[in-house]
Amino acid sequence: MGTKHYTGPCNATNPIDRCWRCHSNWETNRKRLADCGLGFGRKATGGKNGRFYVVTDHSDDSTDPKPGTLRHAVIQKEPLWIVFARDMNIRLHQELIVQSHKTIDGRGAQVHISAGAGITLQFVKNVIIHGLHIHDIVQGSGGLVRDATDHIGLRTVSDGDGISIYGSSDIWIDHVSMRNCKDGLIDAIEGSTGITISNGHFTDHNEVMLFGARDSSSIDQIMQITVAFNHFGKRLVQRMPRCRWGYIHVINNDYTHWNMYAIGGSQHPTIISQGNRFIAPPDQFKKEVTKRDYATEGEWRQWTWRSQGDLFMNGAFFVESGDPNFSEKHPNLYDGIAPFKGEEVTWLTRFAGALTCRPGRSC
């Protein structure tokens, strides 16, 4: 996970990391990260055009957050690049509702969002979340929650997602370490699009990622999401991701563990799987990477689910369907990431998860 067990020289092993890692001046040039996104979330620049906001206080107040707290930072209406003064464990009393044009940058500290509610991006755009540990998230009880400097809203009980993306666009989630949340680790629903999830390390969870929550939500036809350079690790069960309606590019991820299936969906999503490594579990009935729901074979055979250059181990197999030449026929859907071979995935994902970055030293 990240650089936890690595003591050698800095190695930036994939195109996103090569853009900014291994520069010893990263702390004085933090905003370089905003130019490094790839995939469908590549337009996200977060708080690049704003000032820095330093979180100095780990406490949380859902309705009247104190200056210096994370909640006070994310409700500001101006662009902000949010950093942390020191290591912190932040327990959110209610979901953290983030305004547009924000970067939450955990580099330089070990920042844990845990044992409370999760992060919500609702009807916003242009957000980067980088370098956080998010785990042991529970449902928020609901009630009054401040979502802007000038507004408090009445919220229902939150699902308990680590990160919930609802009706939002231009979102980049990078180098997060996530595990054991009440519902999903990352959910993107109700017309969310322009999203990249990269360099993450995910463990200890059942339903990992959900892209599109309802078969009736045809608004999710616009959904475009890139899942790249992530490690899906120990004690995961399913939904890596589970998709509806949209176009999902799953590229150069390392799937070392699943207990039911890895990639699933319903309502005819398009899934292009390129250069991933899939290591099947020992159970002979769990070898299939894919799972289709709520469709006859005659129906799902029309869905475009393609595997290109994937590496299959321990009996893993991917049931393809749809147009084998889909990518060539739709160059407009190219998200800017060219696949490496599946055999290179262990190197590409070597530093997935939250990194250990120290001022004056390369990450």
Image (cartoon, rainbow, N blue to C red):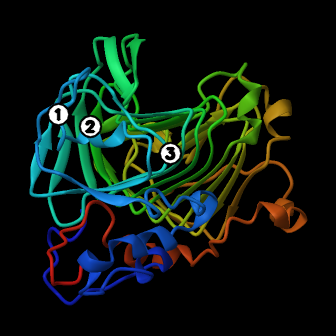
**Residue beneath label 3, please?**
262
345 w.r.t. 260: above or below: below
Query: Tag 3: residue type?
Result: Ala
Image spot of residue 117 (x, y percent): 27, 27
Q: Residue furthest bottom?
A: 9
**Residue 301 visible in this rendered orientation of the protein:** yes
Mark 2 lies on a secondary structure that is helix
Q: Are marks 3 and 1 in contact (CB under 8 Å)?
A: no
Tell me which numbered mark, 2 or 1, is placed earlier along the sequence. Answer: 1
Could you say which disc has been placed on residue 268 in the image?
none
Residue at the (69%, 42%) spot, across then down: 223
Query: Tag 1: residue type?
Result: Lys
144 w.r.t. 82: above or below: above
Q: To which quarter of the image does residue 298 belong? A: top right
Tell me which numbered mark, 3 or 2, is placed earlier along the sequence. Answer: 2
| Relative depth, front residue between 223 and 32 | 32
Q: Residue furthest front?
A: 150
Q: Are marks 2 and 1 in contact (CB under 8 Å)?
A: yes
**Residue beneath label 1, please?**
66
How would you rate the neighbour count of disc 1 (Cα within 10 Å): few for under 14, some for 14-19, many for 20 or more? some
Q: CA distance from mark 3 to mark 1?
A: 42 Å
57 w.r.t. 158: above or below: below
